[in-house]
Image (spheres, rainbow, N blue to C red):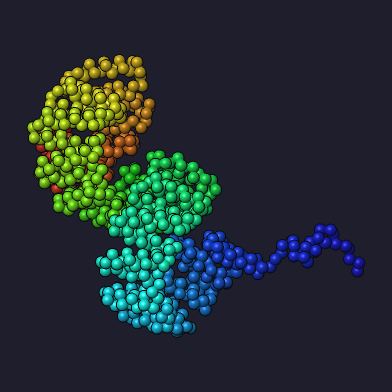
């Protein structure tokens, strides 16, 4: 039969097939081999993410290839981290199921079982290896370690000794044997093992480092330093030894030595971004932010593809308030991949910085859903909940952060602060001390610890903590101020005054020490001395609205409303959002019968400038003092139309709504705005705490009202609010104390009858 000629396209294709240059119909085996070769090449270059992609392709092409699963597991192990270890564990399980002769896969699976605290399963893997290879030192070591983890020390030690007998040159086995002796509380035997190993190989950096660690655990840090230095002399390029020595110096408060070691690492490995990251982390840890920024930028210059360097730099921007710089980099990340985990995490932090807590919470909940073990995301989720004053949710998020990473000092510090605010000083001390152990320079945790001891009445320990802070921070006023509070608790007024004066010497603008001095002078019937001392402080801090506000209060107590009025007006001039100054000025007008005159003055101001916020605010306060609540409400609403974030109007509007039949949810919204803008204002804390009380959220109310009562010790109504919240929260003793304090300050305050009725019931 006559065959028709090939069409041109078929001729071309046939030629290409024959020459293997086109029409790529390569076999599955060829594709698999291609991916395998690429994976090996990437792995050798340290490009483990790329290697993972190629090995996955191999595994997809041939699901029964145990070697591909094994190589995939090795790539995950090289990347490190909890999630990658989980992936490695899954791949190793597949590898040993597909290829029971792969001893290394069995051993690495056993190692992961040990990491997961499953020594029995680890020993099962060791036994599988030892059945086919009884002389396997790795199998014996794994078996020995599993027995030690089960506290079967002597059995474990015997297995490790067998491994040493088979391979006397393996230094790692000596270290495992020494560790087993330490667990068995036989330090002499542990030291003998390490010295024996050093005798075999005097230049073993592993043994030298192990001896250094051993000296630290046995209380001989000077000898430890020598071992670490010897190891570094032998291997000056070794990153781990540099970090070990730097960490040793940090633990022993030798900061300059630690810096020197890390600088040396960056010098000997200038093209390794990790060396610059380590130095940046040290500078961050010690509060040297400019130097940290330089190091992180250098790390990214060295390796522009380093995700670690990128993330460190973004974190630094956010930690130091450079939100715009962070935002630029985060937009770039999310522009390439909208689902990028770290991109979403940093996006949430940016929204937090902009007070968009709801958006941040939504993003962070998505992040922890995708990566439940991401401790940093749990921590910032707690921060976001705190921004919304949802303390129980915040506590849960911080606790989860600590669970996922017990070495996260920020989460422990936040937990300590929450526990202290909730009246649990013992729990606060526990978390604060754990945070301090992680970072001895964590002064926030130290202050919380000292405050907790003071709350407990343990004045000796509180004093010790604050003395250490005063010595460590010679230019900061926080140490002397807190020591002054301890002296007040000891009823040593002379000593307290000296401490408060020292605090002011260190920080002239601090309001807390001068307030304490004024209170002590006033209690000693030295009102003129109190006013004179505050006036003198104004010479050092002439633009302090808080000082003028304090001076006005002292003039009011001295029954000189004219001077008080001038002081309060000056405070408002310096800070138009200072709520307490408005309240005090309004009270001054009310007490002196100058209300009508004040109204005329403020209306004249508004005639010239209808948007004059101070005038609108004062009119609102005056209407409120006259029980003209609708008029006051209208003035506050006018202000909030002009400036929705104006804290004094938001606070007072919330108060009117909660006290005079308004919508509690709207009141809470206004109170939260005030709290965000004035987080340290006790009047705002009282308002939002009282809103929570009315909404039956008693634990939240207690926390906020406690804060208000501590900062406003002479306000009867505030103590009444705190006592009512304590009563509803089931704290009868606390309620009794607070309500009695309120009645002692003013037997006829609004709510005094209700306070007496509650006390009668208690």
Question: 481 or 24, which is in the foreground?
Answer: 481
- Residue drawn at the location 40% of the way across and 69% of the way down: 205
The spot of residue 639 in percent (x, y) is 34, 26
- Quadrant location of residue 640? top left
In what quadrant of the picture does the C terminus appear? Answer: top left
The single residue placed furthest to the left in the displayed view is: 525
The spot of residue 132 in percent (x, y) is 48, 83
Up-down: is 672 above or below 636?
below
In what quadrant of the picture does the N terminus appear? Answer: bottom right
Up-down: is 311 above or below 52?
above
- With 215 as the anchor, is 740 left or right in this view? left
Question: 102 or 602, which is in the foreground?
Answer: 102
Q: Can you see residue 481?
A: yes
The single residue placed furthest to the right in the displayed view is: 2
- Residue drawn at the location 25% of the way across and 29% of the way down: 542
- With 316 as the anchor, is 60 left or right in this view? right
- With 665 as the anchor, is 88 left or right in this view? right
- Residue drawn at the location 25% of the way across and 66% of the way down: 219
Question: 390 or 13, which is in the foreground?
Answer: 13
Up-down: is 60 above or below 314?
below
Up-down: is 558 above or below 312?
above
The spot of residue 683 in percent (x, y) is 24, 35
The single residue placed furthest to the front in the displayed view is: 233
- What is the total number of numbered labels drawn onto the structure image? 0
The spot of residue 268 in percent (x, y) is 45, 58
Question: 597 or 494, which is in the foreground?
Answer: 494
- Residue drawn at the location 40% of the way across and 48% of the way down: 292
Q: Can you see residue 711?
A: no
């Amino acid at each position: 039969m006559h065959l028709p000629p090939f069409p041109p396209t078929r001729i071309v294709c046939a030629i290409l097939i024959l020459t293997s240059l086109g029409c790529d119909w390569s076999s599955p085996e060829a594709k698999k081999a291609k991916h395998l070769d690429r994976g090996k090449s990437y792995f050798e270059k340290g490009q483990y993410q790329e290697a993972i992609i190629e090995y996955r392709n191999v595994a997809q092409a041939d699901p029964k290839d145990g070697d591909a699963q094994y190589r995939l597991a090795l790539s995950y192990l090289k990347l490190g981290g909890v999630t990658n270890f989980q992936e490695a564990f899954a791949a190793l399980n597949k590898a040993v199921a597909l290829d029971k002769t792969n001893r290394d896969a069995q051993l690495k699976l056993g190692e992961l079982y040990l990491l997961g605290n499953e020594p029995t399963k680890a020993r099962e893997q060791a036994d599988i290896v030892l059945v086919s290879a009884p002389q396997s030192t790795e199998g014996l070591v794994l078996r020995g370690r599993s027995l030690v983890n089960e506290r079967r020390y002597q059995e474990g030690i015997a297995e490790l000794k067998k491994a040493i007998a088979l391979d006397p040159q393996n230094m790692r086995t000596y270290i495992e044997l020494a560790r087993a002796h330490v667990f068995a509380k036989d330090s002499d035997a542990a030291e003998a093992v390490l010295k024996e190993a050093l005798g075999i190989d005097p230049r073993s950096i592993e043994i030298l480092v192990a001896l250094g660690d051993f000296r630290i655990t046995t209380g001989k840090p000077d000898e430890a330093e020598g071992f670490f230095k010897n190891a570094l002399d032998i291997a000056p390029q070794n990153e781990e030894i540099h970090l070990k020595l730097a960490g040793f110096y940090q633990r022993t408060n030798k900061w300059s030595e630690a810096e020197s070691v890390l600088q040396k690492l960056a010098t000997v490995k200038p093209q390794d971004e990790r060396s610059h990251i380590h130095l940046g982390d040290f500078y961050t840890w010690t509060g040297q932010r400019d130097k940290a920024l330089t190091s992180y930028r250098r790390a990214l210059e060295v390796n522009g593809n380093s995700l670690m360097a990128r993330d460190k730099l973004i974190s630094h921007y956010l930690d130091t308030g450079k939100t715009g710089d962070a935002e630029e980099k985060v937009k770039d990340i999310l522009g390439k991949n909208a689902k990028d985990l770290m991109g979403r995490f940093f996006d949430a932090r940016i929204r937090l910085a902009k007070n968009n807590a709801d958006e941040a919470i939504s993003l962070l909940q998505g992040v922890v859903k995708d990566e439940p073990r991401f401790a940093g995301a749990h921590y910032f989720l707690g921060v976001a909940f705190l921004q919304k004053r949802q303390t129980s949710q915040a506590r849960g998020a911080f606790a989860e952060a600590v669970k996922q990473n017990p070495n996260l000092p920020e989460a422990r510090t936040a937990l300590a602060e929450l526990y202290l605010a909730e009246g649990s000083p013992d729990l606060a001390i526990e978390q604060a001390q754990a945070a301090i152990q992680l970072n001895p320079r964590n002064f926030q945790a130290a202050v919380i610890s000292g405050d907790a001891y003071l709350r407990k009445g343990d004045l000796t320990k509180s004093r010790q903590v604050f003395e250490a802070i005063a010595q460590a921070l010679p230019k900061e006023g926080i140490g002397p101020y807190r020591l002054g509070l301890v002296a007040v608790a000891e009823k040593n007024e002379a000593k307290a005054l000296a401490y408060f004066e020292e605090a002011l010497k260190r920080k002239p603008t601090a309001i807390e020490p001068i307030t304490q001095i004024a209170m002590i002078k006033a209690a000693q019937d030295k009102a003129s001395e109190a006013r004179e001392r505050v006036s003198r402080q104004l010479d050092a801090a002439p633009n302090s609205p808080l000082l003028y506000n304090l001076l006005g209060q002292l003039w009011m107590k001295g029954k000189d409303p004219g001077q008080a009025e001038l002081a309060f007006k000056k405070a408002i001039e310096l800070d138009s959002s200072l709520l307490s100054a408005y309240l005090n000025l309004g009270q001054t007008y009310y007490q002196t019968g100058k209300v009508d005159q004040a109204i005329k003055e403020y209306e004249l101001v508004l005639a010239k400038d209808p948007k004059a916020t101070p005038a609108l605010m004062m009119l609102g306060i005056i209407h409120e003092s006259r029980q003209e609540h609708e008029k006051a409400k209208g003035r506050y609403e006018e202000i909030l139309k002009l400036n929705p974030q104006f804290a004094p109007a938001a606070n007072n509007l919330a108060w009117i709504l909660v006290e005079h039949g308004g919508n509690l949810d709207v009141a809470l919204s206004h109170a939260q705005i005030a709290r965000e803008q004035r987080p340290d204002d006790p009047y705002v804390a009282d308002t939002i705490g009282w809103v929570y009380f009315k909404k039956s959220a008693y634990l939240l109310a207690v926390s906020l009202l406690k804060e208000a009562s501590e900062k406003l010790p002479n306000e009867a109504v505030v103590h009444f609010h705190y006592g009512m919240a304590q009563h509803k929260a089931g704290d009868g003793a606390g309620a009794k104390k607070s309500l009695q304090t309120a009645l002692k300050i003013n037997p006829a305050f609004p709510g005094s009858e209700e306070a007496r009725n509650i006390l009668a019931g208690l």
